[in-house]
Image: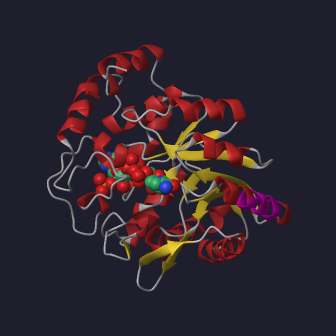
């Protein structure tokens, strides 16, 4: 698996919560998404992260179509736990039952056009640990049946991740990590339990790419940020305090001829040997820039220390 994965949330297109909160990243062009996946493959990216709920099934379909015959060459991760009305493109609830896990997996396999998932991830970040222990055991059954290779929990809570880590084929935890949002306790667990640390929002949902945003497109989650989404204030654009921190880091992140986005990915590789960032993308240009970070490798320990100093950590 490549040191970098590609996150397929944005390429699902628009979808929403039952009360109209946008949950996608605005409109996308499926043909451009397919070209971007092809470009990523050509540049050595062999890991793709999606979820059944992204675009209420659309992201899985677009990824499956783009991979086509090259599916066996890559690691495909998807997620389950959210319930949705696909025609209405609406999230309707959550289901943490073992029987739903099996139904969701069957549907994901069909949409992805494959007969196994490399990494199956529980998408309910705050599910009850007792219930999750049952789901972990269900995942072990999926592994025995050959329809799942390994599994993970997508959660920011190390205590929850530890419940999944007890399973023999639990291989990773997916959690938020970027140069502005460190997660030392989760990284310690990954070290201790020999898990991969799959890093969502490695570019702080776009803030670490250096773009300055005015008002965002109406269908973009960042235009009406839910409580958990940090860095975008009330939706009128990027939070000035976050942008100031990005500005403070610009020189060190771009020091060795990297772009800002590449520097943010390089920080993650320097932070721990277990990290696998999964930047989102919506175009060939973004795919090229993000994949290009691999050739430049991690930041140096000195650059890492300088960043901690600049951020007062
Ligand atoms: N609960 C969960 O399990 C969970 C939650 C969040 C994310 N994830 C996963 O993590 C992945 C990545 O996280 P994320 O989507 O939150 O955010 P991210 O990777 O931090 O930011 C991605 C966004 O930044 C912009 N971007 C990407 N590359 C760029 C470049 N080279 N130059 C300029 N802009 C660029 C794009 O949006 P614009 O072009 O619109 O700016 C892109 O959609 C997701 O796709 C998903 O697979 C999982």
Decide: is 24 above or below 181. below
Was residue 189 drawn as part of the magenta stretch in this picture?
A: no
Q: Quadrant of residue 14?
A: bottom left
Decide: is 102 above or below 283. below
For the magenta stretch, what is the residue range? 134-143
Decide: is 159 above or below 187. below
Image mark count: 0
Q: Is 297 on the left-hand or right-hand side of 191?
A: left
Residue 238: image x %, image y %?
A: 21, 47
Residue 108: image x %, image y %?
A: 62, 72
> Magenta residues: mostly which secondary structure?
helix
Residue 66: image x %, image y %?
A: 53, 67
Q: Which residue occupies the extreme right position in the image?
A: 144
Report the quarter where the N terminus lies.
top right
Q: Is 70 on the left-hand or right-hand side of 66?
A: right
Asked whether residue 285 appears in the rendered view, the answer is: no
Q: Residue at x 85, y 61 (%)?
A: 144
Q: Which residue occupies the extreme bottom position in the image?
A: 87
Q: Residue at x 16, y 55 (%)?
A: 236
Who is closer to the viewer here, 229 or 160? 160
Q: Is 313 on the left-hand or right-hand side of 94?
A: left
Report the quarter where the C terminus lies.
top left
Who is closer to the viewer here, 136 or 296? 136
């Amino acid at each position: 698996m490549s040191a970098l994965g590609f996150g397929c949330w944005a390429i699902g297109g628009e979808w929403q919560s039952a009360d109209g909160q946008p949950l996608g990243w605005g409109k996308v062009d499926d043909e451009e998404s397919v070209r971007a996946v092809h470009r990523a493959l050509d540049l050595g990216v062999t890991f793709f992260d999606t979820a059944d709920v992204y675009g209420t099934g659309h992201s899985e379909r677009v990824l499956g179509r783009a991979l086509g015959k090259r599916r066996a060459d890559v690691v495909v991760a998807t997620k389950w736990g959210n319930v949705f009305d696909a025609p209405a493109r609406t999230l309707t609830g959550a289901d943490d039952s073992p029987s739903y896990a099996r139904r969701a997996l069957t549907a994901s396999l069909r949409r992805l056009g494959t007969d196994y998932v490399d990494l199956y991830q529980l998408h309910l970040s705050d599910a009850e640990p007792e219930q999750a222990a049952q789901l972990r055991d269900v995942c072990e059954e999926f592994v025995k049946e050959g329809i799942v290779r390994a599994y993970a929990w997508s959660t920011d809570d190390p205590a929850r991740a530890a419940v999944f880590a007890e399973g023999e084929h639990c291989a990773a935890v997916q959690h938020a990590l970027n140069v502005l949002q460190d997660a030392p306790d989760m990284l310690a667990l990954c070290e201790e339990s020999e898990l991969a640390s799959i890093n969502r929002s490695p570019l702080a949902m776009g803030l670490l790419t250096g773009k300055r945003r005015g008002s965002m497109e109406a269908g973009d989650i960042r235009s009406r940020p839910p409580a958990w989404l940090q860095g975008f204030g009330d939706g009128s654009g990027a939070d000035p305090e976050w942008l100031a921190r990005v500005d403070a880091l610009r020189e060190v992140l771009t020091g060795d001829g990297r772009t800002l986005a590449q520097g943010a990915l390089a920080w993650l590789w320097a932070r721990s040997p277990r990290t696998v960032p999964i930047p989102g993308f919506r175009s060939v240009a973004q795919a090229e820039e993000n994949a290009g970070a691999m050739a430049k490798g991690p930041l140096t320990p000195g650059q890492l220390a300088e960043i901690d100093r600049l951020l007062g950590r």
